[in-house]
Amino acid sequence: MRVPVLAMAVGIAFAAGGSGLVLHNASAAEASTVPGAAGTCAVADVAADVQEGDMYDENGEFFEKVRLTFTNTSAAACVIDGHPSVVLTGPATGSWRESFRLPETGAPARVTLAAGESAHASVRVRVLPEAPSPWQPEQMRVRLTGAAGHLMLQWPAGLAIQQDTYALPGAGLPNSVESVVAGA
């Protein structure tokens, strides 16, 4: 007797003989070799843009979101998976470190970009307009999950932050990076 089977994921195969079902969770490297499957976006195939947002108040704390837009410049579809890793770099002054890695917030998402399509991620930072000695990052080192290498992007001039890593009551993490979202 034949039983129709709907395969919902790459890597499901029937063993000869009809009774054995082999499940295999394909790795990213294997998935990229499947005809028609999009591989991880390579750093060389992505153009990145940085846009500074407006300052906003959340429970008496001031924040700003910086939008990172990634555009697939290759001729083939590719995947951006989860949160980009973002490290802010700048001068080591006073009690501030030379580099500051932003923690990730929110559930990771997977976005497939056709040629010319874009996705974005938001970097949220705590700003203290009245602070006597905030830290002025100069650049962002951005690494896409699974991609070799990284992008070096200019940090918005004049956007000074605090290198805080503790959660603020009612406002969450002061400095963080969100997962990618489809669209520019």
Image: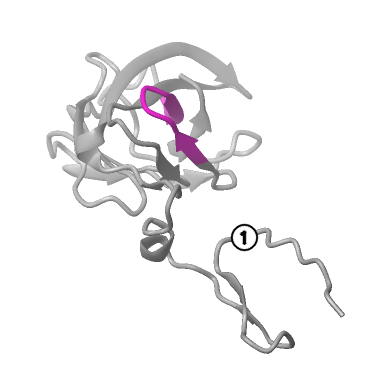
Residue at x 47% of width, y 46% of height: 82
- Picture coordinates of residue 158 (x, y %)? 25, 14
The foreground one among 152 and 119 is 119
Give the number of marks: 1
The foreground one among 50 and 8 is 8
Residue at x 26% of width, y 17% of height: 156
Q: Amino acid at mark 1?
A: Ala
Residue at x 30% of width, y 30% of height: 75
The foreground one among 125 and 47 is 47
The answer to whether residue 16 of the structure is visible from this angle is: yes
* Main secondary structure along the magenta-highlighted residues: strand
The foreground one among 103 and 110 is 110
What colour scheme governs how the chains and residues are painted in the rendered image of this protein?
one colour
Q: Which residue is mark 1?
A: 9
Where residue 45 sits, quadrant-wise, is top left
Q: Is residue 58 above or below residue 85?
A: above
Q: Is residue 78 above or below residue 120?
A: below
Where residue 176 sits, quadrant-wise, is top left
Where residue 117 sits, quadrant-wise, is top left
Which quarter of the rendered picture does the N terminus lie within? bottom right
Task: Determine whether the residue tagged by mark 1 lies in a helix, strand or loop.
Answer: loop
Residue at x 38% of width, y 24% of height: 69
